[in-house]
Every structure is written in C-alpha cells, then in structure tokens.
Image (tube, rainbow, N blue to C red):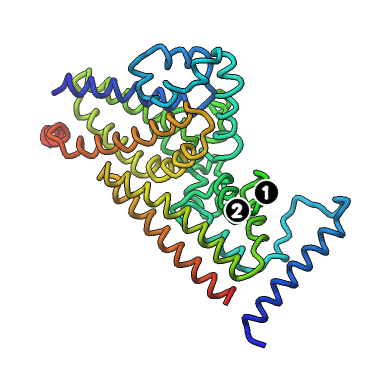
Amino acid sequence: MDIKDLNELRSEFENLQKREMQSDCADGSCMTDEPSREDYPDYLAAIFTEIMPPVKSGIYFSRWDLKKMAGEVDESFALDVRERMFQKFMQWVGTPEDMQQVIEQFNNNMNAKCDQYREYSKKYPSTKEIFDKKIEKAESSKKYLDKVYTEFFT
Amino acid sequence: MQEELITEQVARINIYALISRLLMTEVDESLLKLITEDENIMSFFPNFKKWEKRTKMSPTDLIDKELNVDFTNLFLLHLIPYESFYTREDQKMETGGDNPLQAIYSAFDFEVELDVARVMSGDHIGVELEFMYKLVEAQSKALEAGDNETAADIAGIQYNFLKDHLLEWAPMFLLNVKLEAGTALYFDAAELALEFIMSDFEYLTQLQKSTFVKDVSEESK
C-alpha cells in the first residue's frame, strides 16, 4: 500500500466518521458552538493561518467570497461566522481532486483581486509600491497552497 | 497658487466629509436629499443616478427597505470595516486602548465618540476618513492664515496616514463592498471612496514634490 492509498483511506475514514457523527446527532443534542479542531487534518489550520489573514495573503476572503467559492464546486452553506464557513468549506474536501478544486477557487479569487491591484497601481502610480507588496503576498500564498497540496494530498 | 491650493482643499474636505458620513452610519432622509438634489454630488454616483428603484420608491421606503438593509449587510454583519482585522495575523479586531490608531488620534486631539458614531473602535473606515477630513480642514485653515509651513506639515501627516493606514487595508475592504453591494448607492460609494483615496494619495505625493513644499522648507532653513 503506498502513501496515496493511505491518504485515500484516511479521507474515506473521515467521511465515514462525519456520517456517523451526523447520524448520532440527529436530535441536535451534541451540537456546540466550539469548533472541534481535533477532527480536522492539519491542512485546515495551515490554510487558515497562512492564507486567510489579509495581512499574510494580501487578500480579503470575505464570507460572501467563501460562499461563492464553495458554490463554484457545487457546495452550499449559509452565511455564518467566517472561520466556521471556512471550516465547512474544508470539510467538503474528501479527495485530492477536491482539494485541487478548492485551491483553484482560492487562486481564482486571488488572481481577480490582483488584477484589480495592478489596474489601480497603473492608474495611480504612487500606489504601486503598496499594491506590489499585496501582489507579492498573494503570489507567495499561491505557492504555499501548492505546498500544502503536495504535503497533505500526494 | 495660494488660492488654487485653498480651492483644492475645499474640494477635498467636501469629499472626505461625504464618504466618511456614508461609510460610517446608515443613510437618513437629509443625506439622501443632499445627494440626489445636488448635481455635482450626484455625478459621483452614476449607477445610483440611473437606478430604477431610486426613481420609483419613496425616500422613506428606499432608505428602510433597500439602503439600510444593504448598509447592515455590508458594514455590520458580513464585511469587516476595521483596520486591525486586516493588519493582525490573528484576524481579530483591536477594540481596546491598544489600538495603534488611538495614539495617533490622541496626538492630534482627535476624539472619537464611539457611541455616537456607533462603531466598535477608532480604526473603522468611517472614522479614519473623518480623521483625514479634520486634517485637510486644518491644512486649509493654515493656508487661509498664510501659515504655509504648518499647512505643508499637515499635508505630510495626511500623506503618511494614507500610506501607513488607509491605503494599506481600505482597498481590500472596499473591493469586497463593490463586489457584494446589493444597492447602486453602496456600489458607487465604495467606488468613490476607493478612487478618491488613491487619487488623493497621488495628489499628496505630487504636493510633496511641488514647489509649495520645497519653498516652505527653504523658508524654514
């Protein structure tokens, strides 16, 4: 059995656990406001800490952004606390292919906003230094997402 | 030159006052009237001008059923109009006295009445824009009094405040307001605020290089 099989097995196991939890919690008695981080693999914390903060990625991923990005991969959830929406989006990831789609959505959002930054810095040259830093951060974030994929999904 | 400078400051004061007010609290009937009845102001809101609902709904209905609902979604519920969220790695807002903006405001005797403004902290976009408004107003008064040295100093403070604060984060927020606005008024308001702070930074950058600032620094030697 190679590492890819192991990863697939782990994804299947997580999905099974999730289904078990949902069926055990049909009456809502086990619901809490606290996120159960121990149920999440490490890539979730990695992305939330390294990509989601605007100061690190140069991009603001809003609640609506997350909802739209999820919609692009046919996932749907209600507007909620930003961190919880991010967690729900990540819970959707079951396979390496899913993760590739998620990364593509993050990249599309960053690319669209960087295009705007470029447009602004061209129109107002004094702002170039400010927007260039944000674009650099976004480019570095895209590379980091690739690293996360390689580390956790291959 | 002096008169031209004073005229430019009056225009800047008016725009900072308008965008600060629009992004701070909900629209009321007097603000709506001010926007819709002044052709110059209305020209800043091209989409709102031709927005069908604006012409078909009464001002009260427009405010209650459209504009205030959109304001609540954009500024209170779903987007984050506070600088600290964009500058802290933990993505939290700094609502206490440790907010770095507080020290800047205190240095210039700018008092933020959070309860009156109905904001959680002084790094709200509306408050930061109001601070710029006060700075431009002070610069204008200095120019009118012929105190060009003080006016040049205040212009330098504005330049730094835009560079280190507003431009560092407000474009990220305002881009999302544009993307997510449900009414033409807030789409245009976000566009106006975005374009204005960037063009004002361009103006201040040129002012730093202009003969106005150079002459003042020569005189003070």
Q: Report the residue at 58% width, 66% height from top.
A: A99
The x, y position of residue B191, in whole percent, is 40, 34
- Specify the subunit that label 2 lies on: A
Q: Is residue B110 above or below residue A38?
A: above
Residue B148 horizontal side relative to residue A14, left or right = left
Q: Earlier in the sequence, mark 1 or mark 2?
A: 2
In this figure, which residue is indicated by the disc labeled 2? Answer: A70
Near mark 1 (Cα within 10 A), the count class, few <14, some 14-19 or many ≥20, is few
Q: Report the residue at 60% width, 65% height from top.
A: A98
Pointer 1 with pointer 2, Cβ within 8 A: yes
State the image quarter where residue B40 is shown.
Answer: top left
The x, y position of residue B192, in whole percent, is 38, 31
- Specify the subunit that label 1 lies on: A
Q: Circle 1 sits in a helix, a strand or a loop, which is it?
A: loop
Q: Is residue A60 above or below residue A145?
A: above
Three-letter amino acid code of the residue under disc 1? Phe
Whether residue B117 can be seen here:
yes
In this view, which residue lies farthest toward the bottom? A1
Q: Report the residue at 73% width, 72% height from top.
A: A12
In this figure, which residue is indicated by the disc labeled 1? Answer: A77
Three-letter amino acid code of the residue under disc 2? Ala
Separation (CA) of disc 1 from disc 2? 8 Å
Residue A70 horizontal side relative to residue A110, left or right = right
The x, y position of residue B32, in whole percent, is 48, 16
Q: Circle 2 sits in a helix, a strand or a loop, which is it?
A: helix
Q: Quadrant of the C terminus of chain B?
A: top left
**Which of the labelled discs sits on residue A123, or is there none?**
none
